[in-house]
Structure formats: structure tokens, C-alpha cells
Image (cartoon, rainbow, N blue to C red):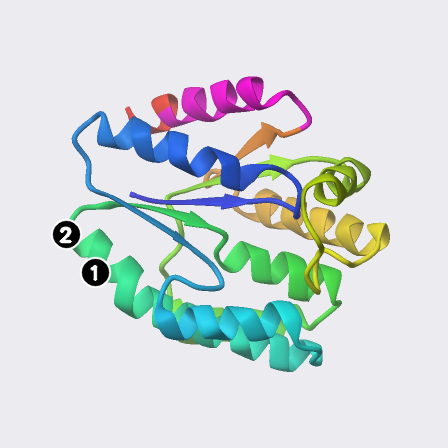
């Protein structure tokens, strides 16, 4: 099973990867925990460039998809071929949300890149951690120095959130929305309840 976690920066999604991994391992599954951009040495180097170096939206999109191609070929597809569960912090939905929604980059170009890079491969389940941008911003400010994306204004993250919602509406069977405004324990309970339902 290929499972992704999505949401704007500060939604708290990364916190729940370990709990999902533990849930699957308790059921005897091999679990591969990974992230995007990243997941391989080359993709991690590209991630550093994307997060910290100024560039135009096309360059940014090309680097993200280059990292994704490496990740899909070397990590995701081999893991799925051996029947492992892949838990990935972000995938292509994030590109449509951040570069497409946030940056206003052409969705037609992104869709073409999506086809070239991973064809019909989509997650089996995507957890969308939904939270208002102002809440996420307060959380980010409390825990870390912002990278190039986290430093964007509230309007940027409003566009990102809206783009995520458009992806969800286009593929509702794949998405499970998590109310990320709740306390971490309540969010974790939602996530594990959804996982229990989808895995049976």
C-alpha cells in the first residue's frame, strides 16, 4: 500500500508518520518511511536547493519532479514490488498545491510532468491534514526557523490549502481529510481510525 500525508506547513502531519508505521508493523508489514522532496541521496540534495535557494517556479517544479523521479524509481516502486507499505511525507499533490496553487504555476505543465515522472502511479490513500493558515503559521513560528516556503505569507498558504482541496475534490476516493486543528492525541485517533477502516 502506498500512503501519503499532505497538508500545509504546520499542519502537524509529520508527527503521525511514526504512529502509522507502528500500526502497520504491529500487523507484520514491512514499512518504508520516506519523504518528498527527498528519499534518496540525490533527491535530498535537490531538496536542499528547493528549500533554500531562490529560483523561478518552473525551475522549482523541474527540480521537485527530478527528485521525485529518482525517488519513485529507487525507493517507492521497489518497495511496492516486494509488498511493503510505503509511508511518504508528501508526493505530487504537494507540487500541485505549492507550485500550482501557491506559486500560481501552470497546472497543465505540472500534469504533463506528473505523467512523465510517474505515469499512473498514485497513492492508494492520502491523508490530508487540514488546518487554517493562521493556525499553521503560529505553530511554525513556535518551533523552528522558516525555510523558503515556510516564510511565505498567509495568502500563499491560503492558495496552497485551496489547491489541496481541488485535488481532493477531483479524486475524493483517494483522500481522507483529517481535522488538524485538534490536539495531537485527537488527530492521532482520527488517523488510526481512518487507517483501520481503509485497510480492511
In the image, taking residue 183 as reference, residue 152 lies left or right, namely: right
Asked if residue 106 is positioned above or below residue 167 in the image, the reply reads below
Q: Which residue is mark 1?
A: 78
* Residue 151 found in image quarter: bottom right
Q: Which residue is located at x 27 percent, y 31 percent?
A: 24
For the record, the magenta segment spans 181-195
Asked whether residue 115 is in view, the answer is: no
The answer to whether residue 122 is seen in the rendering is yes
Is residue 90 or residue 122 the one in the foreground? 90
Magenta part, dominant SS: helix
Q: Quadrant of residue 71?
A: bottom left
- Helix or strand or loop: what does disc 2 sit on? loop
Does residue 96 belong to the magenta stretch? Answer: no
- Within 10 Å of disc 1 (Cα), the crowding (few <14, some 14-19, many 20+) is few
Q: Secondary structure at mark 1?
A: helix
Left or right: residue 150 versus residue 20 is right
Please give the residue where the numbered disc 2 appears in the rendered image: 82
Q: In front: 75, or 95?
A: 75
Task: Return the x and y of residue 116 as percentages of the image width and height.
Answer: 42, 76
Q: Any mark on residue 64, and which? A: none
Give the x, y percent position of residue 184.
Answer: 58, 24
Query: Which quadrant holds the N terminus?
Result: top left
Mark 1 and mark 2 residues within 8 Å of each other at the beta carbon: yes
Left or right, residue 37 beside residue 117: right
Q: Residue at x 36, y 28 (%)?
A: 198
* Structural distance between the alpha carbons of marks 1 and 2: 6 Å
How crowded pointer 2 is (Cα within 10 Å; few <14, some 14-19, many 20+) is rated as few
Q: Is residue 186 magenta?
A: yes
- Up the image or down, 161 lies above or below 182; here it is below
Number of marks present in the image shown? 2
- Residue 161 percent across, percent down from the top left: 71, 47
Amino acid at each position: 500500500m502506498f500512503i501519503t500525508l499532505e497538508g500545509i506547513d504546520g499542519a502537524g502531519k509529520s508527527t503521525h508518520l511514526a504512529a502509522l508505521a507502528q500500526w502497520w508493523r504491529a500487523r507484520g508489514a514491512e514499512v518504508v518511511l520516506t519523504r518528498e522532496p527527498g528519499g534518496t541521496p540525490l533527491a535530498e540534495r535537490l531538496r536542499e536547493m528547493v528549500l533554500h535557494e531562490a529560483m523561478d517556479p518552473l525551475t522549482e517544479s523541474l527540480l521537485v519532479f527530478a527528485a521525485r523521479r529518482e525517488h519513485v524509481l529507487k525507493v517507492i516502486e521497489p518497495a511496492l514490488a516486494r509488498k511493503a507499505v510505503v509511508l511518504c511525507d508528501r508526493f505530487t499533490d504537494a507540487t500541485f498545491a505549492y507550485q500550482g496553487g501557491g506559486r500560481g504555476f501552470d497546472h497543465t505543465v505540472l500534469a504533463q510532468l506528473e505523467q512523465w515522472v510517474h505515469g499512473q502511479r498514485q497513492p492508494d490513500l492520502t491523508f490530508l491534514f487540514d488546518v487554517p493558515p493562521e493556525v499553521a503559521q503560529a505553530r511554525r513560528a513556535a518551533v523552528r526557523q522558516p525555510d523558503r516556503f515556510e516564510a511565505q505569507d498567509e495568502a500563499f498558504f491560503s492558495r496552497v490549502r485551496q489547491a489541496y482541496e481541488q485535488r481532493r475534490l477531483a479524486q475524493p476516493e483517494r483522500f481522507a481529510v483529517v481535522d488538524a486543528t485538534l490536539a495531537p492525541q485527537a488527530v492521532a485517533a482520527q488517523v488510526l481510525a481512518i487507517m483501520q477502516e481503509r485497510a480492511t
